[in-house]
């Protein structure tokens, strides 16, 4: 079974994690990153921009809002 992440992605995530641990990793808005998950996301994003092997990011809208299987019906009163 092939790995989902390539060497470039591993390197970028490792660098982001080291920077987070030192307190020097910044997000896009300039704030210091404290979250481990956010550091991983930054590393994967940088790897994708440089053409590294990493799966595409998840769609935020579809994961936050769950669609119902049947359409809603209007109640007749």
Image (tube, grey):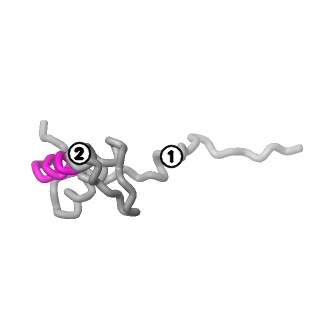
- Disc 1 on helix, strand or loop? helix
Using the image as rendered, state which of residue 18 and residue 60 is in the foreground. Answer: 18
The total of numbered circles placed on residues is 2
Q: Residues within 10 Å of mark 2 (few under 14, many from 20)?
A: many
35, above or below 24, in the image: above
Query: In the image, which is nearer the foreground, mark 2 or mark 1?
Result: 2
- Disc 2 on helix, strand or loop? helix
- Residue range in magenta is 6-17
Using the image as rendered, state which of residue 70 and residue 26 is in the foreground. Answer: 26
Residue depicted at x 36% and y 53%: 32
Residue extending farthest top? 1
In magenta stretch: residue 29:
no
In the figure, is residue 36 to the left or right of 48?
right
Across and down, in percent, residue 33 comes to 35, 50
Residue depicted at x 28% and y 54%: 25
Q: Which mark is residue 64?
A: 1
Residue extending farthest left? 7
Quadrant the C terminus occupies: top right
Q: Which mark is residue 17?
A: 2
For the residues marked 2 and 1, what is the alpha-carbon distance in whole angstroms?
26 Å
């Amino acid at each position: 079974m092939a790995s989902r992440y390539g060497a470039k992605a591993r390197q970028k995530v490792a660098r982001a994690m080291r920077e987070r641990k030192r307190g020097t990793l910044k997000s896009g808005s300039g704030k210091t990153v404290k979250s481990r998950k956010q550091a991983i996301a930054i590393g994967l994003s940088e790897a994708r921009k440089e053409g590294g092997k990493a799966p595409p990011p998840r769609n935020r809208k579809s994961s936050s809002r769950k669609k119902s299987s049947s359409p809603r019906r209007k109640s007749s009163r």
